[in-house]
Amino acid sequence: MFEWINGHNLFIADSGESSLPPVVFLHGFPFSHEMWSGQIDLLRGRFRTVAFDFQGHGRSDIGDGQYTIEGHVDDLLAVLDRRALDRPVLAGLSMGGYVALRALERHHDRFRAAVLCDTRSEADSNEARVRRHVQMTMVKTAGAAEFADTFLKAIFAPSSFPRHPDAVAFIRNIITHTPPLGIAGTLLALAGRTDTTGALASIRIPTLILVGEEDMITPPAASRSMQERIAGSELHVIPGAAHMSNLENPERFNALLKEFLERVGR
Ligand code: MLT
């Protein structure tokens, strides 16, 4: 369904009875809520799941191409308020994790637990910012399909191309349907995001950290650093996966997610 939130239309997938414990899923860049389809199916009947497309992605409005992680947090909080969700579990992958970490920094009391997947608390380095600029130029001149072909090699493990061709095609299809303006605008938002490392010590809710063993974008070392700072957090490194751990090793990812949610999410 579409909802008018903070001056733009967002596409929101809200499934399950309102009496069930809620889990909110935040997608990575430049994907859509559909990247969580496997996990939404997994939790059907046990949890209410809410997943939405960030502005500039999926079926949500593109707007003027000017976004910030701060604005995505505002949208997340408005989506929660609209539903009066009682302390949901907050799960985010990569950019979804950046949004989750900033939301926790602003309002850690609003969430029951957190699942941080293939993400990091540090802001971009200067080198990363320069790389974002190159990617922005590329997507604006060559288009989303060419951007997708390069980006897929960075986010999937080499072995995932022959082992999970459907997952690769699925993500490629989402990226190629994302307007270049949405991709370029989000690259600027990623480059400009704040560093949430200083706030990790104030996270006092159960936290599960998952990362693909071969993740090059947000490597296991970044997850270890978060785990050291978040008291009581659990870290699992997922074999046979790079940055898209929920799609590259869904069996292991789903088993860890389900066990955690059954334990702390209800
Ligand atoms: C993502 O998957 O959200 C992005 O790769 C994050 C990033 O580039 O920092």
Image (cartoon, rainbow, N blue to C red):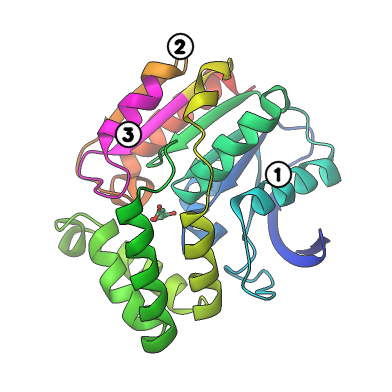
| Residue pointed to by mark 1 | 16
Q: Which mark is residue 222?
A: 3
Q: Is residue 176 above or below residue 74?
A: below
Residue contact between numbered discs 3 and 2, judged by CB atoms under 8 Å: no
Judged from the image, the secondary structure of the residue bearing numbered disc 3 is helix
Q: Is residue 156 left or right of residue 17?
A: left
Q: Is residue 243 visible?
A: yes
Find residue 175 and report its horizontal and vertical position in percent.
43, 72
Task: Compare marks 2 and 1 and give the one earlier in the sequence.
Answer: 1
> If the picture is divided into quarters, which one holds ligand 1?
bottom left
Residue at mark 2 to residue at mark 1: CA–CA distance = 30 Å
What is the spatial separation of the Cα atoms under label 1 and label 3, in whole angstroms? Answer: 34 Å
In the rendered view of the protein, which quadrant contains the N terminus? bottom right
Q: Nearer the viewer, residue 160 or 153?
A: 153
Given residues 15 and 128, the one toward you in this image is 128
Instruction: Determine the residue positioned at 30% across, 50% down.
Output: 217
List the residue tagged with mark 2: 232
Instruction: Tell which of 65 and 62 is nearer to you.
Output: 65
Dot 1 amino acid type: Gly
Q: Is residue 187 left or right of residue 172?
A: right
